[in-house]
Amino acid sequence: MGGRLLAERHEIDGRPGAEWAATVEAELAALTAAKVVTKVKPDLYVATAVLADLEARLRAYLAAHKEITPQAWKDLTGTSRKYSIPLAEHFDAQKVTLRIGDLRRLR
C-alpha cells in the first residue's frame, strides 16, 4: 500500500512514509473487521453501506433487465471502468452475479 506515494516522497505529513503506510493498513484492517469498509481488492476498499446500496441497485436492475453489460454497470455505479470492473468482480465473488462472457446475471 502506498508504494507509488512512498517512491515519490519519503515523508508524509512529517512522518516516515513506511510508518504512515503501516498506520493506514492497521486502520483499514480495523475498519474492515468492524464491517465499516469492505476490501474489494488489495488496493480498493469501499464503504460497506455503499456496497449494500450498489447491490440493491444491481439486483433491481437485473430483476428488470435479466442481464447487465459493462457499460450499463458503469453507468449504474457512476464510476469509471477502473472501479466498476473490480466492483462487478466483487459481486461475482460474493455469488450475487454470474459472469457470462461480458454480461452478468443474478445467480
Image (cartoon, rainbow, N blue to C red):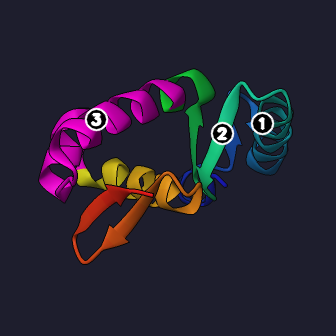
User: In x, y percent, where is residue 85?
Assistant: 34, 58
* Discs 3, 2 touching: Cβ within 8 Å: no
Residue located at (16% from left, 44% from top) = 65
Q: CA distance from mark 1 to mark 3?
A: 22 Å
Q: Can I make out residue 63 in this image? A: yes
Helix, strand or loop at label 3? It is helix
Under mark 3, the amino acid is: Thr
Q: Which is more N-terminal, label 3 or label 1?
A: 1
The magenta segment: 52-80
Instruction: Give the residue pinned by disc 1.
Output: 32
Q: CA distance from mark 3 to mark 2?
A: 16 Å
Q: Is residue 58 left or right of residue 80?
A: right
Q: Is residue 97 left or right of residue 27?
A: left
Helix, strand or loop at label 2? It is strand
Instruction: Give the residue pinned by disc 2.
Output: 38
Q: How many marks?
A: 3
The one nearer the camera, 61 or 27, is 61
Which image quarter: residue 107? bottom left
* Discs 2, 1 touching: Cβ within 8 Å: yes
Q: Classify 10 Å Cα crowding around label 3: few (below 14), some (14-19), many (20 and above).
A: some
Helix, strand or loop at label 1? It is helix
Which image quarter: residue 78? top left
Instruction: Give the residue pinned by disc 3.
Output: 77
